[in-house]
């Protein structure tokens, strides 16, 4: 297959994935809308408590089981059916998504995360895959609509705003660190995103922790939510440390001659690291546990995504400018070189 | 300032402090004040706030141009914001990461960190050698506890418990004759070790980073390609030089180098057609005046290390060789002039302004010129090929050049008179061509064009210390996040219905699924399953 054919395949696969994600989202919405106005059944009550893995510590005040009515049974069936359908569709979409990323790699003859569009594609794939793979183990059904919505939304932003045709890498990116550094950063981004969704749901649930009706009844107990969020964040933090404080500086040193340049991307990656370090500490500090820690996790997520997309609108001095906006086009052949030359290049080229 | 763990700050300490608080209001003595301040500074909450403050303080540096990153941009910004600039300047906002208030935050954080680590090291040391604590009186009041009755004897139950827990690598409390029927065990000691390792490593990293930025330097130099040209590592040879505050010129390593050959490959197709795909230089260097000459292939991502000083290839460009003659035909200046690329097609800008001359030149260099349909010249690629399409396009300026100051790459045209070719156009020369300047100002010859390389040369002492520190920090982090410390107690005693066995688990990390641990343990004690759950 030619480069062009691979690129077309990738673009079609992205479109296919987006459509299937959308169907999955619809399915989950049907599933959750069926929950509204319903009381929890005794069977679900038990499974939910077990979902937390703490059989002897009831998370939720257990209500007297409501009497089964045919209507309830019908509803429960509908919830289960659309839940399964939604998950299946998400799996399918993730396969199409994976195809898109892989064929993008074949089109470019390199790892498929050389620019913002590709990183968005790969990053959302990691969120989707992590969700699909951890679904059974961490019992993530309650997360479904949020995850699918997030993946779909970011994927659409990628396609509509960040799309760039396949192009070769700038010189500084020709390094095996591209594989290590970017994979770890993307994995961490995926983990932090999932963790952030858990923390967000934690905050919503916290307002009325005892609800037994409506869609919040589907969400596990606060303690479980908090623990799931913590585990995902802890995993993400380790990867982020590796990406930002080990592989990043090593590569920066090789390519730009200095392992830490206070480049805006580096600064924001550092800010993200510090905020998540704050989150991990806050979880163990009196007065910061629970609500404040969850808020910190969301602040961390905000800095993470701001660093990925937002900072490019504020700063043009970043050496990470090859990851810049396609419209900007101000990328340079050697980031470090341009940066150095800036000090001697006249700002206004003269008219001759 | 430590990682999660409910026992970070001993609640007993708080209670003790509350009890000791004076009942009547009186002034604090200096000693008490110091003690109180130290307590506050090393408290977890203060550390957390300092940490968040550090994140917040780092923000402005990414939004406001920083002098040491891009001085031209910073100067322009200052000129454009005349009201804000002096205020920002006073606040150190143009050099955030070197400012006093930024330093204040991380130094306080360091002190807080050390104040937290040192006592905990002692606590950990004592804890390592101590026995796991004996079972509390009321096991069933523990958050995760259960009990069951069995027909086995007390001795059998405790023996089994010791075996099961021992196999799971728990540390067991010595058998105490006064406490028969009890088993106390603890595991996960490495969590705190990881925690301490992480925080100590953070300090190591900061020391490494500080030494690197205080005693190191970073400099840039443009070196022309060719055996005739070169660079020797002396302060005067650098175009720009950014030393750490404790750097002394005597710390410069002795070496000299020249660029024997240089090669660029250009993209021939695709959306980035015409741009450089890759470039490499063949460097020859000597570390002493009559030492051997060594070769090195210098590429982006492949720096050359000469005894701790590293040389990086970070950019390249063209230097047209221009000869300027006066009206009598005497050479005023001759040789390559570095032109700086303006865009990815290597359309380059440069000036010739010998102080002794009456004429200065300012112009653009087109590596491969094409003429657009509207008659305007354009440049689409930096690939110079056989140099047949290379064009030097310039204007001349006459006047006194002895007062020129500032960058050698720009011309200050105030007080100078522009001289153009007939029709007000620029002079355009191909390689080998000569243009005669009007008004008897002499002539300009475009002899040839060569390449130049931008090298960055830097010395970063202790960089391996910093790297080692981060790697250790990561190891510590793994331990402190994923090891789950817990205590387990089993108590068996005879009752009328048989042997009553109580099992309790105390999670010391705050993230454990204790319920599962308890049920798994009970299952094993009852011999139901050998599944290793805990």
Image: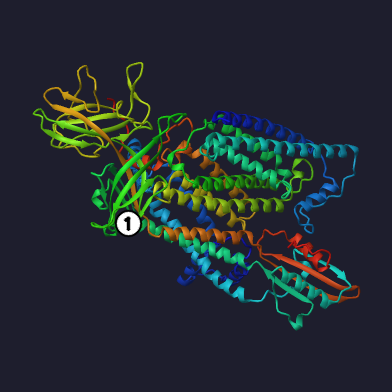
Mark 1, residue position: B245
- Image quarter in which the C terminus of chain B is found: bottom right
Q: Is residue B307 visible?
A: yes
The chain under label 1 reads B
For this view, does A220 lie left or right of residue A330? right
- Rate crowding at label 1 as few (under 14), some (14 to 19) or many (20 or more) other CA atoms within 10 Å: few
Q: Residue at x 51, y 50 (%)?
A: A244
For the point 58% across and 49% down, the residue is A296
Q: Is residue B397 left or right of residue A92?
A: left
Name the foreground residue: B415 vs B140: B415
> Measuring 91% from the left and 75% from the top, which residue is drawn there?
B496
State whether residue B411 appears in this view.
no
* Residue A258 x %, y %: 40, 50
Is A164 displayed left or right of B144 in the figure?
A: left
Residue A288: image x %, image y %? 61, 55
Can you tell which quarter of the image residue A263 is in?
top left
Q: Residue B13: x and y, percent?
A: 60, 69
Q: Is residue B433 above or below residue B30?
A: above
- Helix, strand or loop at label 1? It is loop
Which residue sits at x=18%, y=35%?
B334
User: Which colour scheme appears in the figure?
Assistant: rainbow
Which quadrant of the figure contains the N terminus of chain B? bottom right
Vertical side of B130 occupied by B365: above or below? above
């Amino acid at each position: 297959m030619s480069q062009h054919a691979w690129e077309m395949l990738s673009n079609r696969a992205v479109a296919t994935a987006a459509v299937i994600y959308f169907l999955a989202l619809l399915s989950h919405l049907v599933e959750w809308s069926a929950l509204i106005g319903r009381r929890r059944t005794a069977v679900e009550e038990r499974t939910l408590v077990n979902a937390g893995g703490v059989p002897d510590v009831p998370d939720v005040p257990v209500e007297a089981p409501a009497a089964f009515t045919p209507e309830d049974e019908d509803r429960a069936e509908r919830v289960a059916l659309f839940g399964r359908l939604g998950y299946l569709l998400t799996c399918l979409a993730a396969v199409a998504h994976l195809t898109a990323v892989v064929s993008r790699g074949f089109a470019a003859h390199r790892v498929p995360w050389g620019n913002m569009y590709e990183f968005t594609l790969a990053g959302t794939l990691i969120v989707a895959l992590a969700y699909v793979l951890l679904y059974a183990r961490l019992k993530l059904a309650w997360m479904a609509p949020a995850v699918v919505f997030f993946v779909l939304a970011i994927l659409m932003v990628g396609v509509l705003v960040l799309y760039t045709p396949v192009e070769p890498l700038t010189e500084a990116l020709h390094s095996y660190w591209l594989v290590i550094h970017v994979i770890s950063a993307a994995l961490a981004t995926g983990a932090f995103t999932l963790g952030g969704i858990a923390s967000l749901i934690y905050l919503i649930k916290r307002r009325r922790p005892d609800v037994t009706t409506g869609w919040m009844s589907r969400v596990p107990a606060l303690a479980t939510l908090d623990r799931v969020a913590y585990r995902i964040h802890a995993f993400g933090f380790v990867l982020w440390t590796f990406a930002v404080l080990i592989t990043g500086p090593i590569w920066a040193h090789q390519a730009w001659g200095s392992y830490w340049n206070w480049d805006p991307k580096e600064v924001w990656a550092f800010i993200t690291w510090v905020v998540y370090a704050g989150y991990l500490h806050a979880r163990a500090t009196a007065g910061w546990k629970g609500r404040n820690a969850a808020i910190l996790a969301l602040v961390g997520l905000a800095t993470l995504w701001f660093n990925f997309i937002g900072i490019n609108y504020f700063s043009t001095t970043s050496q990470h400018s090859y990851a810049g906006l396609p419209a900007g086009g101000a990328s340079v052949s050697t980031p470090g070189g341009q940066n150095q030359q800036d000090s001697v290049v006249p700002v206004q080229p003269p008219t001759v | 300032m430590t990682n999660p763990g409910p026992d970070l700050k001993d609640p007993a300490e708080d209670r003790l402090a509350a009890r000791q608080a004076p009942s009547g209001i009186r002034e604090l003595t200096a000693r008490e004040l110091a003690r109180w301040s130290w307590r506050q500074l090393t408290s977890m909450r203060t550390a957390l706030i300092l940490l968040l403050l550090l994140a917040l303080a780092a923000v402005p540096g990414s939004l406001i141009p920083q002098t040491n990153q891009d001085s031209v941009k910073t100067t322009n910004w200052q000129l454009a914001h005349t009201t804000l600039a002096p205020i920002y300047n006073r606040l150190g906002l143009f050099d955030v990461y070197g400012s006093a208030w930024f330093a204040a935050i991380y130094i306080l954080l360091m002190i807080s960190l050390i104040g937290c680590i040192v006592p905990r090291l002692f606590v950990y040391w004592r804890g390592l050698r101590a026995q796991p604590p004996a079972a509390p009186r009321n096991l069933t009041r523990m958050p995760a506890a259960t009990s069951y009755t069995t027909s086995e004897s007390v001795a059998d139950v405790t023996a089994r418990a010791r075996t099961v827990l021992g196999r799971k690598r728990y540390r067991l409390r010595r058998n105490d004759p006064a406490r028969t029927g009890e088993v106390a065990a603890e595991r996960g000691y490495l969590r705190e070790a990881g925690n301490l390792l992480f925080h100590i490593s953070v300090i190591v990293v900061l020391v490494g980073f500080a030494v690197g930025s205080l005693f190191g330097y970073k400099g840039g130099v443009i070196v022309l390609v060719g055996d005739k040209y070169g660079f020797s590592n002396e302060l005067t040879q650098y175009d720009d030089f950014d030393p750490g505050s404790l750097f002394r010129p005597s710390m410069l390593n002795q070496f000299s180098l020249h660029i024997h050959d240089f090669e660029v490959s250009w993209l021939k197709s695709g959306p980035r057609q015409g741009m450089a795909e890759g470039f490499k230089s063949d460097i020859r260097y000597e570390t002493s005046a009559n030492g051997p000459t060594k070769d090195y292939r210098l590429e982006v991502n492949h720096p050359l290390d000469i005894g701790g000083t590293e040389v990086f290839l970070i950019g390249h460009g063209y230097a047209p060789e221009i000869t300027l003659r006066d009206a009598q035909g005497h050479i005023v200046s001759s040789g390559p002039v570095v032109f700086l690329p303006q865009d990815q097609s290597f359309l380059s800008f440069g000036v010739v302004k010998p102080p002794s001359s009456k004429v200065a030149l300012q112009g653009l260099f087109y590596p491969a010129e094409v003429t657009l349909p509207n008659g305007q010249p354009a440049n689409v690629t930096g690939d110079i090929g056989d140099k047949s399409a290379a064009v030097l396009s310039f204007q001349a300026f006459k006047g006194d050049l002895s007062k020129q100051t500032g960058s050698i790459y720009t011309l200050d045209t105030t007080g100078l008179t522009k001289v153009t070719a007939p029709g007000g156009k620029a002079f355009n020369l191909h390689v080998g061509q000569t243009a005669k300047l009007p008004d008897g100002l002499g002539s300009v010859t475009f002899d040839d064009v060569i390449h130049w390389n931008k090298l960055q040369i830097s010395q970063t002492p202790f960089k391996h210390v910093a790297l080692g520190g981060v790697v250790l920090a990561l190891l510590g982090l793994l331990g402190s996040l994923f090891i789950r410390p817990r205590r387990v107690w089993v108590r068996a005693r005879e009752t009328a219905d048989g042997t009553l066995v109580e099992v309790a688990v105390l999670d010391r990390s705050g993230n454990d699924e204790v319920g599962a641990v308890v049920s798994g343990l009970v299952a094993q004690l009852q011999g139901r399953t050998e599944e290793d759950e805990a």
